[in-house]
Image (spheres, helix red, strand yellow):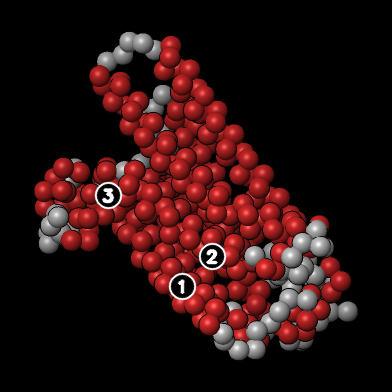
Amino acid sequence: MCYYNETIAFFYNRSGKHLATGWNTVSRLVMGLGITVCIFIMLANLLVMIAIYVNRRFHFPIYYLMANLAAADFFAGLAYFYLMFNTGPNTRRLTVSTWLLRQGLIDTSLTASVANLLAIAIERHITVFRMQLHTRMSNRRVVVVIVIIWTMSIVMGAIPSVGWNCICSIKTCSNMAPLYSNSYLVFWAVFNLVTFVVMVTLYAHIFVYVRQRTMRMSRHSSGQRRNRDTMMSLLKTVAIVLGAFIICWTPGLVILLLDVFCSSCNVLTYEKFFLLLAEFNSAMNPIIYSYRDKEMSATFRQILCCQRGLSYLVSGSAESIRECCCL
């Protein structure tokens, strides 16, 4: 028997998840904070995409992938924005379809971020082992990679809506996500956690290789040293981005597994905290770039406060950008 025509309250009552009937002080504060963070996420990641577009020094595959990661975070901001206006007491007004859409948007944004980070890790692995600063991948191949990332993300986000849910198998419903089946949540959490392990392994392999190679190479020109230092700086930046992502998302994925396998664990108590932690991650990357990448930071300042046209940035170096920026 399927329950497509039932209300959201029906599924929440069966799972034991509390469905608010009115706004209290805590829920208003959470919503206010969430909306504020969403706006910052969208504006900050839009700034990253503009910076990479207007500055020729960023016209390389690694930066195109970083721009696509910013696009994924921008999409996450939109997904969370939609969530904030359809949570709390407003959840009662959702239909089965709109509830699945709400969750599917978040799933799509997470998949896009994970896939982008994996693509960046593979790109860095290839370039470092070839001792190059930038891969020679053509723009066409980068576009193909980006299209694959978003196609896979949309498919992953749509899976529960097209059938992998518990609407026709009510006994398998999750407590945290009352319309999702336990089997899907296990698949979702394990898939992402395994991907995290793969990315960490790739970066660990890279750092071990670079350290061993550096110890063997006692003599090299100043140009080679600059190239190596630039490569390591960029590598450390993307590694920090990955680390922040894993720290913010791993607790939420673990709690999904606990929801399925630990009936005595009161996971619903911590659900909103881990959701906010995951949301904050989408705001972190622009901050990391501004502190770690001088060229990116200078481009940000130029976009935000320079009186000259953005075309000046296309050929401008970090030094020339600083000169025209009203600091």
Residue 184 numbered mark, or none: none
- Which of marks 2 and 1 precedes in the sequence? 1
Amino acid type, label 3: Ser
Amino acid type, label 1: Leu
The image shows residue 240, relative to residue 261, as above or below, that is above
Task: From the top left corner, tell me how far across and down residue 212 is, in percent.
Answer: 48, 17
With 282 as the anchor, is 258 left or right in this view? right
Residue 33 numbered mark, or none: 1
Per the image, the residue denoted by label 2 is 276
Residue at the image point whose x is 86% and y is 71% from the top: 171
Q: Are marks 3 and 1 in contact (CB under 8 Å)?
A: no
- Position of the C terminus by quadrant: bottom left
Q: For residue 255, which quarter of the picture?
A: bottom right
Per the image, the residue denoted by label 3 is 297
Mark 2 element type: helix
Does residue 91 show up? yes
Amino acid type, label 2: Leu
